[in-house]
Amino acid sequence: MSIYRGLAMTVAGSDSGGGAGIQADLKTFAALRVFGTSALTAVTAQNSLGVQAIHDIPSEIVYEQMKSVLSDFSVGAVKTGMLGKTDAIGAVCRAVRDFSVHKLVVDPVMIAQSGDSLIQDDAVSAIKEELLPLATLVTPNVPEAERLSGLEVPDVEGMIAAASAIAGMGPQAVLVKGGHLEGEKVVDVLWTSGKPIKFESPRIDTENNHGTGCTLSAAIAAELAAGCELDLAVERGRAYLMMALERGFKPGKGYGPTGHAVTPDWVKKGE
């Protein structure tokens, strides 16, 4: 009997510092006992202080990586992260269509925590026009939601408006993450079936939050791959992220990563 609850795939960039990207996604999959596969879109020279260099993987290689896995393995869910150029986005969309990916979580990674841009301007349009219509869920933070929707997002009502606008671009659901807004609580807004659902949690006071977006989207994809419905997958993904944030640490001189090596109770129970 397999110890794994499901099988998922991450299509993202590599973070040599280990806190975000492919590395964070695979650690999250493993913590949730979901077997992780991957397709690399970029290699970054990166540490806790910033991104020093980026090398994009050729789009045909991105497609071939996805083809190799999706043509062989029964992948329950796919998540995307860093897709910096339009040709990479096109390759991902082609693979999603060619291999009938039914559960796709899109984390529209645009800016590193250090402030470094990770995407070209024309790639934002490609995400909106090509990738979002294929998505089960898109998970922008507030700056990403503003860039995708063209709206200002100063508060929770703004998050709801942006989520509704992004939903109009074609994804089945939108999760706008409110961590960038001030307040003692963090409010995330899930727009699904034409209405918002609010998730609230206490704000965890920590600077060790590098890779939180990657970790959350990977956790949601893992739970979808394990057979959860979307609402429960989001709830569990947020719960796992809170656990990881509480156990964050500081291996370098800048922002530290979350502590991925935590096992939630539902995983221990095999639920």
Image (cartoon, grey):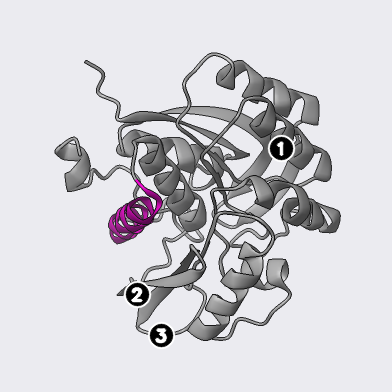
Q: Is residue 143 visible?
A: no
Cα distance between the residues tagged 1 and 2 = 35 Å
Give percent across and percent down for residue 76. Answer: 45, 31
Q: Residue at x 48, y 26 (%)?
A: 75
Give percent across and percent down for residue 15. Answer: 58, 42
Kindly indicate whether the residue at mark 2 contacts the one at mark 3 (C-beta within 8 angstroms).
yes
Identify the magenta region: 229-247
209 or 234: which is nearer to us? 234
201 or 116: which is nearer to us? 201
Residue tagged 1? 93
- Which mark sits nearer the N-terminus, 3 or 1? 1
Residue tagged 3? 183
The image quadrant that residue 99 belongs to is top right
**SS class, disc 3:** loop
Cα distance between the residues tagged 3 and 2 = 8 Å
Cα distance between the residues tagged 3 and 1 = 37 Å
Number of residues whose C-alpha sits closer than 10 Å to that of mark 3, classed few (under 14), some (14–19) or many (20 or more): few
Give percent across and percent down for residue 85. Answer: 80, 45
